[in-house]
């Protein structure tokens, strides 16, 4: 990477991460703690942590000056041993990246991505009061960069942990595609012996409003004590810190870009909540015993997920490199009539076509209007109340096992991992009937 004006300015002033510095130019005169570059930052930006705890980025130009005001006392990094208590259960902590997989250097206030087992485990030392932590990093990626090959790798790591000494597994993960990973694990992992909890944070650990601490603490508690044997997502229930919601991995979606309670269960209620040291389940969940976790990771990634909109076209889809197509249709599951011929041609070429709804809430029903009936007559497969990304992942998994049209349709309409609801509940959670588990 070529040197920038910011690099030269830092070098000339002999400034180090953690130094108290003053940065001035024609527009600003700012004092704060010099922060390290993170992988996603523009290199010609100086990042400072202000006295109020917030970070500010200053773009360096010809008029910018940097002066070191004070240098903190620096000590070498002290090796940290992960504590072990024979009375506590073992929880595997599998790092994948994302905002939650960061730790704060409280000397400088800087936030760093966890690069090794020790960093990841000690990002939240309170978890050692709940379980013996076996931590390792599977990969360190932004969640938008994940591919099906990463899901497979993660599934095998989960199975390895549960078939070893781990009672449960916690997976810190970027929030943007967490629901895709949760769905993939739900379809690939068979015979779970304990909870598999995906957890993220909307706000990094250096922010006063960070949700990382409570989300991770609740996830470890869930993995260490709950009898659920499913893939779930644990995130803030609301904007306050009163509860962490437990969402089924195949029914959850990120519904806001930045709110702490961005995740919601759609066409289903959340399975329960973690409130302090108490776990409350409000819905039925899978808890049947199993002796060994098996990974079934056959997936066909020649699937396309396409949003239907006025004026859209499917002409760009090639029969040669497409085995499946998931349409995010309008309303009850519709697509423009002018696409029917292309859809018919794809199905005749043994391309499985599945219809979901971009409404997200509600069930696909292609028997109401004439366009829907025509799609059904072409043998487009309705997705029931599955979310589009869940149908996409499920079709990948099914086509990894068979391309027989009748079998593909049968499996798509079969509830394999809690992805299809027999009844869509009302929007507001029902009260009462709590099944409680306490420490």
Image (tube, grey):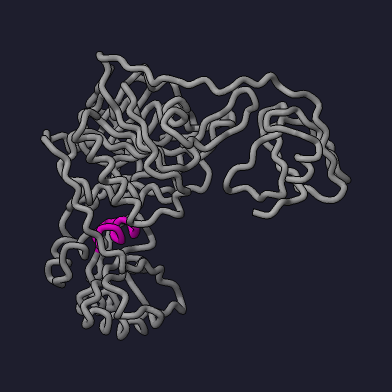
Give whichever of 194, 41 is nearer the camera. 41
Give whichever of 239, 353 is nearer the camera. 353
Image point (41%, 51%), residue name: 177
Q: Which residues are magenta?
A: 383-395
Residue 365 at x, y = what percent?
Answer: 25, 65
Quadrant housing residue 432: top left
Image-based side of 400 in relation to 392, left or right:
left
Quadrant for the C terminus in the image: top left
Image point (24%, 66%), residue name: 382
Position of 45 relative to 371 (above/below)? above
Q: Is residue 201 visible?
A: yes
Residue 209 at x, y = what percent?
Answer: 56, 31
Residue 9 at x, y = what percent?
Answer: 79, 43
Position of 369 relative to 173 (above/below)? below
Q: Is residue 422 visible?
A: no
Give whichever of 406, 1 is nearer the camera. 1
Position of 71 relative to 154 (above/below)? above
Residue 116 at x, y = what percent?
Answer: 44, 34
Give whichever of 106, 138 is nearer the camera. 138
């Amino acid at each position: 990477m070529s040197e920038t004006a910011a690099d030269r300015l830092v070098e000339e002033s002999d400034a180090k991460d953690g130094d108290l510095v003053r940065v001035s130019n024609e527009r600003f005169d700012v004092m704060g703690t010099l922060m390290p570059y993170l992988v996603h930052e523009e290199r010609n930006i100086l990042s400072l942590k202000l006295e109020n705890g917030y970070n500010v980025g200053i773009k360096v130009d010809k008029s910018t000056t940097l002066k070191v005001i004070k240098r903190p006392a620096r000590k070498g990094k002290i090796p940290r041993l992960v504590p072990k208590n024979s009375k506590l259960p073992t929880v595997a902590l599998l790092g994948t990246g994302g905002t939650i997989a960061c730790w704060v250097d409280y000397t400088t206030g800087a936030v760093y991505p966890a690069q090794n087992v020790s960093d990841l485990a000690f990002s939240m030392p309170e978890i050692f009061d709940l379980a013996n932590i076996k931590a390792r990093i599977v990969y360190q990626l932004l969640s938008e960069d994940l591919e099906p090959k990463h899901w497979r790798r993660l599934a095998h790591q989960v199975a390895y942990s549960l078939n070893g000494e781990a009672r449960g597994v916690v997976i810190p993960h970027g929030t943007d595609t967490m629901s895709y990973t949760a769905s993939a694990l739900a379809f690939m992992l068979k015979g779970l012996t304990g909870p598999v909890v995906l957890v993220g944070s909307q706000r990094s650990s250096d922010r006063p409003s960070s949700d990382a601490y409570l989300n991770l603490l609740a996830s470890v508690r869930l993995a260490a004590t709950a009898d659920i044997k499913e893939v779930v997502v644990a995130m803030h229930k609301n904007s306050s810190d009163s509860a962490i919601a437990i969402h089924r991995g195949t029914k959850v979606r990120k519904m806001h870009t930045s709110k702490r309670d961005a995740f919601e269960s759609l066409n289903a209620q959340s399975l329960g909540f973690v409130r302090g040291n108490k776990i409350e389940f409000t819905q039925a969940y899978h808890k049947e015993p199993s002796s060994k976790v098996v990974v079934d990771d056959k997936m066909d990634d020649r699937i396309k997920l396409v949003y239907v909109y006025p004026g859209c076209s499917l002409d760009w889809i090639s029969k040669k490199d497409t085995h499946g197509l998931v349409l995010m249709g309008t309303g009850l599951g519709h697509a423009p009539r002018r696409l029917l011929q292309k859809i018919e041609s794809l199905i005749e070429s043994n391309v499985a076509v599945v219809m979901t709804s971009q409404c997200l809430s509600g069930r696909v029903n292609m028997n109401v209007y004439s366009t829907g009936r025509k799609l059904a007559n072409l043998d487009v497969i309705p997705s029931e109340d599955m979310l589009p990304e869940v149908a996409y992942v499920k079709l990948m998994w099914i086509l990894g096992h068979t391309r027989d049209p009748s079998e593909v349709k049968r499996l798509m309409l079969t509830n394999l991992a809690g992805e299809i609801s027999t009844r869509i509940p009302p929007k507001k959670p029902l009260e009462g009937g709590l099944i409680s588990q306490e420490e």
